């Protein structure tokens, strides 16, 4: 009896040791950032239903003050970029809804002038559109003092559409069977290279 108990303890002791030795540790791989894609002029077409699926809320059902947003900073046009695009339902009344579509712009240059057009398309047809000519944008982190240069208003800027829709249009344009898209077109007026010297 003593012998079989001793044999059992020896077997348990030898089988428990290798289990601890099987655990190995290593540094986890870090994700590589998405590569930038240079496209000039740059046109972004954003499928609103896809954006709603990612955000897990529809524009129709979200409360007033709600918004959906997508990051688009991986696409550049000579260092100018659309950092993000957002669509929000600002206010809601019984017969109308206030919608805003904003594109946040930035640039890697100290100063760069761009043209911007933001449009809402439904089933391929432009329903609302707004254009901004010669917007001055720039690097908000640039060290202006060391360069002895001052350019008023050349940091990141947000521009876009702001419009009231009749409730019937709102429900039709943003319905699940409608093909609603936001189109953002960015074109460089000057390339900013002369500002770096």
Image (cartoon, helix red, strand yellow):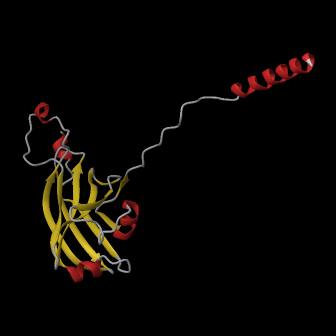
> Residue 143, relative to residue 153: is it above or below?
above
Q: Position of residue 127 (x, y in %)?
A: 23, 79
Image quadrant in which the C terminus is located: top left
Residue 24 position within the rendered picture, expressed as x and y whole percent measured from the top left: 64, 29
Q: Quadrant of residue 18?
A: top right
Residue depicted at 38% across the width and 50% down the height: 36
Residue in front for this viewpoint, 128 or 168: 168
- Residue at position x 27%, y 50% in the image: 79
Q: Quadrant where the N terminus lies? A: top right
Q: Residue at x 38, y 62 (%)?
A: 56
Image x and y of residue 172, in percent: 29, 82
Q: Residue furthest front?
A: 1
137 shown above or below 116 = above
Residue 34 against residue 95 in the figure, above or below: above
* Image quarter of residue 177: bottom left
Image quadrant where residue 38 sits: bottom left
10 up-or-down from 22: above or below:
above
* Residue 87 locus on image (x, y percent): 25, 64
Tally of numbered tags: 0
**What's the residue at 25%, 61% (across, down)?**
66
Q: Is residue 148 left or right of residue 60?
A: left
């Amino acid at each position: 009896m003593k012998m079989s108990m001793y044999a059992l303890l020896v077997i348990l002791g030898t089988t428990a040791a290798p289990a601890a030795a099987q655990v190995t540790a290593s540094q986890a791989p870090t994700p590589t950032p998405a590569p930038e894609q240079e496209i000039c002029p740059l046109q972004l077409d954003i499928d609103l239903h896809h954006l709603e699926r990612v955000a897990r809320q529809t524009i129709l059902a979200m409360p007033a003050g709600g918004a959906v947003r997508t990051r688009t900073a991986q696409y550049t046009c000579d260092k100018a970029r659309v950092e993000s695009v957002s669509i929000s339902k600002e206010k809601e009344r019984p017969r109308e809804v206030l919608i805003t579509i904003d594109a946040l712009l930035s640039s890697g240059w100290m100063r760069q002038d761009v043209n911007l057009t933001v449009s809402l398309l439904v089933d391929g047809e432009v329903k609302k559109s707004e254009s901004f000519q010669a917007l001055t944008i720039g690097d908000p982190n640039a060290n202006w003092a060391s360069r002895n240069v001052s350019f008023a208003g050349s940091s990141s800027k947000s521009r876009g559409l702001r419009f009231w829709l009749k409730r019937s249009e709102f429900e039709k344009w943003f319905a699940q069977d409608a093909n609603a898209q936001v189109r953002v077109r960015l074109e460089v007026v000057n390339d900013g290279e002369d500002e770096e010297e």
